[in-house]
Amino acid sequence: MNHQISRNLVIEEYLEGPSYSIEVIGIAGNYQVFQITELEMDGDYDCKRVLAPVELGDQLIREFEKITLKLASDLSLNGIMDVETILQNGKLKVLEIDARLPSQTPTAVYYSTGVNMVE
């Protein structure tokens, strides 16, 4: 019996819990994160509302920022991307990374903080 693990595995897990998003922008290892937003979903349209600010707690906010900055660095990001997580049983689990200007969250961050990511 061969117990060797293939490096071509794709593992999926069903995650249930609130969804959060954060943007990171930068070039050449110099990165800045923005305000975390909460994403409300529905069965018909996926993301139906973006909320800011969020009640996530300082420790989880720092953890999410650290995860995001590490991903940006590991990917040698030159531009902007967002990272979406699900909070399940007190742990943030990365759901997806979008290496593009996000569609909904910059507006929520702008009206919440006055920070314009496009500028």
Image: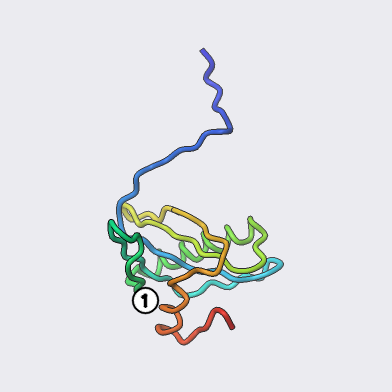
* 115 left or right of 87 in image: right
Residue 26 screen position, x and y as percent: 64, 71
Residue 4 screen position, x and y as percent: 56, 23
- Residue position for label 1: 52
118 shown above or below 87: below
Q: How is the image coloured?
A: rainbow
Q: Tell me the quarter of the picture where residue 40 sits.
A: bottom left
- Quarter holding the C terminus? bottom right
Q: Tell me the quarter of the picture where residue 74 sits.
A: bottom right
Residue 15 screen position, x and y as percent: 34, 49
Pick out the residue farthest to the bottom.
114
Q: What residue is at 35 percent from the left and 59 percent from the top?
A: 46
Q: What residue is at 50 percent from the left and 84 percent from the top?
A: 115
Pick out the residue farthest to the left.
43
* 17 left or right of 79 in image: left
Q: What residue is at 59 percent from the left and 71 percent from the top?
A: 25
Pick out the residue farthest to the front.
44
82 shown above or below 106: above
Q: Nearer the viewer, residue 14 or 29?
A: 14
47 shown above or below 51: above
Disc 1 residue type (three-letter): Ala
Q: Residues within 10 Å of mark 1 (few under 14, many from 20)?
A: some
Q: What residue is at 54 percent from the left and 16 percent from the top?
A: 2
Residue 20 screen position, x and y as percent: 39, 64
Q: Tell me the quarter of the picture where residue 54 sits.
A: bottom left
